[in-house]
Image: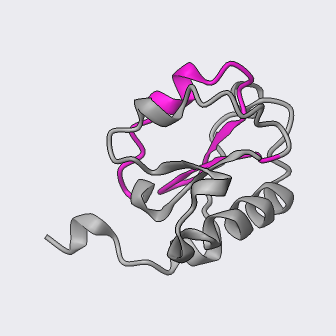
């Protein structure tokens, strides 16, 4: 089971996870990163690097975090996010659910 990025990543995007991913499966949207679940090898290297604990192993997702699975699958398919994030480059567009969220910097 792959790892997923929860909404805790929104407007933080530290990207330290991208740097440590050995298979280059973490793609960059505008306000969040997305792990391609088909490319993830479940190594867990990304999880401890996230400063806001936004990366969660699929089996450990809380009930309210299950949307991360759907978002990742839909986003990857919609943007053809395959073949390596470094090769693909920043995609710069988020899943509709993430775009609909208010910006965290606007809340302060």
Residue 104 drawn at (x, y percent): 28, 67
Name the residue: 20% across, 75% down.
Answer: 107
Using the image, determine if residue 90 lies above or below residue 54. above
Find residue 78 and report its horizontal and vertical position in percent: 83, 63
Q: Position of residue 49 (x, y in %)?
A: 42, 30
In the image, residue 84 sits, relative to residue 54, either above or below, namely above
- Residue nearest the viewer, comparing 71 with 89: 71
Q: Residue at x 86, y 59 (%)?
A: 77
Q: Residue at x 50, y 36 (%)?
A: 47
Apparent side of residue 47 relative to residue 34 in the rendered image (left or right): left
Residue 27 point in image, percent of width and height: 66, 41
State left or right for residue 79 relative to residue 100.
right
Q: What is the span of residues highlighted in magenta in the rendered image?
A: 11-37
Residue at image point 47% right, 57% down: 31
On-image quarter of the C terminus: bottom left
Magenta stretch holds residue 9: no
Decide which of 3, 21 is in the foreground and name it.
3
Please identify the residue farthest to the front as the structure is shown. 59
Tally of numbered discs: 0
Tell me if residue 28 is in the magenta stretch.
yes
- Residue nearer the viewer, 100 or 46: 46
Above or below, 22 against 48 in this view is above
């Amino acid at each position: 089971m792959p790892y997923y990025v929860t909404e805790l990543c929104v407007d933080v995007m530290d990207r330290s996870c991208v740097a440590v991913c050995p298979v280059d499966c973490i793609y960059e949207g505008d306000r969040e990163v997305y792990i391609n679940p088909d490319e993830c090898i479940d190594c867990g290297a990304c999880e401890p690097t996230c400063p806001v604990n936004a990366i969660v192993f699929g089996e450990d997702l809380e009930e309210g975090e299950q949307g991360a699975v759907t978002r990742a699958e839909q986003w990857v398919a919609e943007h053809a996010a395959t073949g390596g994030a470094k090769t693909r480059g920043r995609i710069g567009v988020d899943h509709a659910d993430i775009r609909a969220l208010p910006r965290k910097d606007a809340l302060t």
